[in-house]
Image: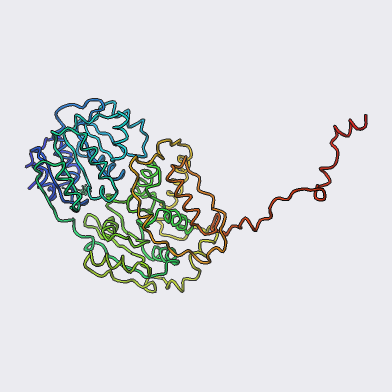
Amino acid sequence: MNFDEFGLSDAILQAIRESGYETPTPIQAQAIPVALMGRDILGCAQTGTGKTASFVLPMIEALSTGRSRARMPRALILEPTRELAAQVAENFEKYGKHLKLTHALLIGGEFMTEQLKTLERGVDVLIATPGRLIDMYERGKIMMSDVKIFVIDESDRMLDMGFIPDVEKIASRLPSLRQTMLFSATMPPEIKRLADQFLMNPKTISVAPPASPAETVEQRKIFCQARDKRTVLRQLMRAEEIVNAIVFCNRKRDIDVLVKSLVTSGFNAAALHGDMAQYLRTETLAKFKSGEIDILIASDVAARGLDIVTVGHVFNFDVPYHPDDYVHRIGRTGRAGRSGKSFTLVTDDDAKSIAGIERLIKRDIPELKLSDVAGGRSAEDAGPTEAAEDERPSRPRRERSARSGERSERGERGKRRSSKTAEAVEAPEAAEAEAAPEPVEAEAAAPVEPPAPPAPAKPARAAKPARAARPSPRREQSDRQDSRDAPARGRQGFRTEHPADIPGPQSFGEDNTPAFLLRPTRKVAASQAS
Ligand code: AMP
């Protein structure tokens, strides 16, 4: 089968050719003809199968006739995360570039005023995360009475993230005469129930997941102590020829610590997590895609579904709690037939999680001994523990390959630029969280990593939180949480003094009043003399 057989317009076929696609993927071959008939679809497919084009292409075809009206979109696509929504918007632009269709991206963390202006002009397609959409709807900024095509993408992720009540609320506000397409990688009972509730006589289409990452990604696990993780990660990174990599952490608060530690050691790294303002997430991702940043330290949610074809390495700084997340994580590399490598750091506490992963992927992940890492030593030999390493003041950048060295410099310049922007931009809404909260990112469930030795003997003064453009309440909360949990360290990890160690203020009293305070001022002396 090829794309010409679907009966799509020339403008769309040309865009497909320009995208370099030769033949439809299995989900496209099955879904596009059904969608073009206007029938509801229940699609069981995950990212990487080409499912986005399977609903965007017929949607563009259907919308190419007719006109949009102000604040009344004709199609609505719901995505669980801002990044996925942005990715779908990119697809929409790519496939619709020879047509005059318009779209709006309605995601939390972006300026609402800009989004409102776009809506006022009239858009054909609204691509939204549920929280922001409900917010706009309840403020009376959008009318959904003209929506004829409704897509619920990544439904199982919506479920994981607690968005199903929002999805139900949105669906109940749409006209009942519409086409609905629901996609999900898995079909748990809650998603089946959602499908029964909102789809009418759907065609069920199920495709095999894309080639399992197990086949294209060289996976290794490394056993180490929790306190040595950062040392081991650096050791691995130095031993590998890294062009770019994503490092996954289970907890958001560990991400910033790790970024700081890697940057101090000369790596060109940046954070990507759900507490960052959206414009920073977008900027960081763009820099990573362009090669300005080599290493992304990410949370599962922020990096989910990212379509970056050329990620060479994935490091699991923490073993994910859900085996599915392991597959998603390592699936960021080894894409589009390329090979990739993944390394997972495993501590004694991770026995259960790693066993669950190996059960899911139906194979043992081969172990890599640290002593076998090129130029490596075992963690025990590695000298100072990471606590000690982190207390060292900033060291000069390490020697790296000419190419990555050059990139690091660019990255540094970029970083300086971006930090300026961060300070300059007033972000009343950039910091605004989604109306429905961003997912928990395993914070709550995360077991606490043993603190780096030596443990602080006394409660310490909290480290000063990093300066940020008007932090959101959630950000403040996590900062507070971080400062409670942080061992007694100030800048550069140096131990700070406990308030009790600092002499308190003394009252002067009669005996302590310094002599200069008892000397009469000139004015007083003059009045006494006269
Ligand atoms: P998706 O599953 O929609 O996230 O798509 C995964 C990747 O497959 C994206 O990078 C698409 O550009 C690409 N893709 C989609 N359809 C095709 C196709 N027919 N041929 C080749 N690549 C495709």
**Residue 352 seen from this side:** yes
Q: Position of residue 510 (x, y in %)?
A: 82, 48
Q: Residue furthest right?
A: 530
Q: Nearer the viewer, residue 439 or 29?
A: 439
Q: Position of residue 405 (x, y in %)?
A: 43, 55
Position of 468 with respect to 41 (left or right) is right
Is the residue 449 above or below the residue 187 in the image?
A: below
Q: How is the image coloured?
A: rainbow
Q: Position of residue 52 (x, y in %)?
A: 20, 45
Q: Nearer the viewer, residue 453 or 505?
A: 505
Q: Nearer the viewer, residue 321 or 24?
A: 321
Instruction: Examine the image and state in which quarter residue 363 appears.
Output: bottom left
Residue drawn where x is 55% and y is 55% of the image = 490
Instruction: Examine the image and state in which quarter residue 107 appears.
Output: top left
Q: Quadrant of the C terminus?
A: top right
**Residue 295 seen from this side:** no
Q: Position of residue 18 (x, y in %)?
A: 19, 41
Position of 240 with respect to 185 (left or right) is right
Residue drawn where x is 21% and y is 63% of the image = 215
Instruction: Examine the image and state in which quarter residue 218 appears.
Output: bottom left
Is the residue 334 above or below the residue 170 in the image?
A: below
